Image: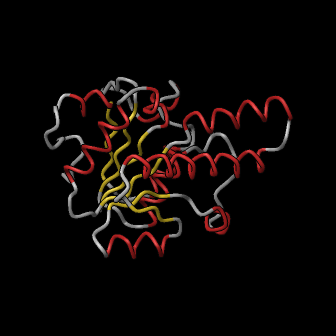
Amino acid sequence: MIVVKLGGSLTESDALLHCLDSVEQNFPHGGIIIVPGGGAFADQVRLAQQHWKFDDRTAHKMALLAMQQMALLFQGLKSHFTIAGSLADIQKMLNQQKIVIWSPDISELDKAGIQASWDITSDSLAAWLAGILSASKLILVKSAIIDPALSLQELAKQGVIDKAFCVFAMRGSFKLDIVSAAEIYRTNGSPCPALSTT
């Protein structure tokens, strides 16, 4: 089983649909969980917090709701993909060979002790999910071009991944790939090597 995080910025072009199509082509029998970024919905939370000065705990919950909104958007584009919130529901859907979109359960993340901080975004949450479910692989799909020579720490400094990602990634035993959506475009409708179990 693998986890694929699709960055929210992919919604700014037709890259998102290309990525969802590639997931569908590469995993016709399930075995994959899609983690949505918050995208423009999360950006609105940041702007609201700057204006109203509410605390990070409130912003954290609102950002998780942004991911839930994006999950609904994804399913709106791929109606046969299944949304699941809790870990138990995810496992149930995987057992039924479904392609799963994660809509994070706020209370479950609270119980897991996930800190309310902008240092922890959907990148780190994808790594947490991959670790807790013993995924074999985590793939982060970004709109940015990824320099394979850069370390995780350097990618975090550049803002390509969030500041807490390195800590969450080290806790899991999964293989990690960080790829650009441009790699998925090059497949022209064929199964994409970047979105594979190997």
Residue 25 % position (x, y)? 19, 49
Horizontal arrangement in the rendering, residue 19 relative to residue 66 (left or right): left
Asked if 116 appears above or below 87 in the picture, the reply is: above
Asked if 75 appears above or below 37 in the picture, the reply is: below
Residue 156 % position (x, y)? 50, 32
Q: How is the image coloured?
A: secondary structure
Q: Residue at x 50, y 51 (%)?
A: 72
Q: Which quadrant: the N terminus?
A: bottom left
- State the image quarter where residue 111 is shown: bottom right
Q: Residue at x 18, y 51 (%)?
A: 198
Residue 78 % position (x, y)? 36, 51
Front-lying residue, 184 or 123: 184
Residue 12 % position (x, y)? 46, 27
Asked if 12 appears above or below 110 in the picture, the reply is: above
Front-lying residue, 35 or 12: 12
Front-lying residue, 76 or 103: 76
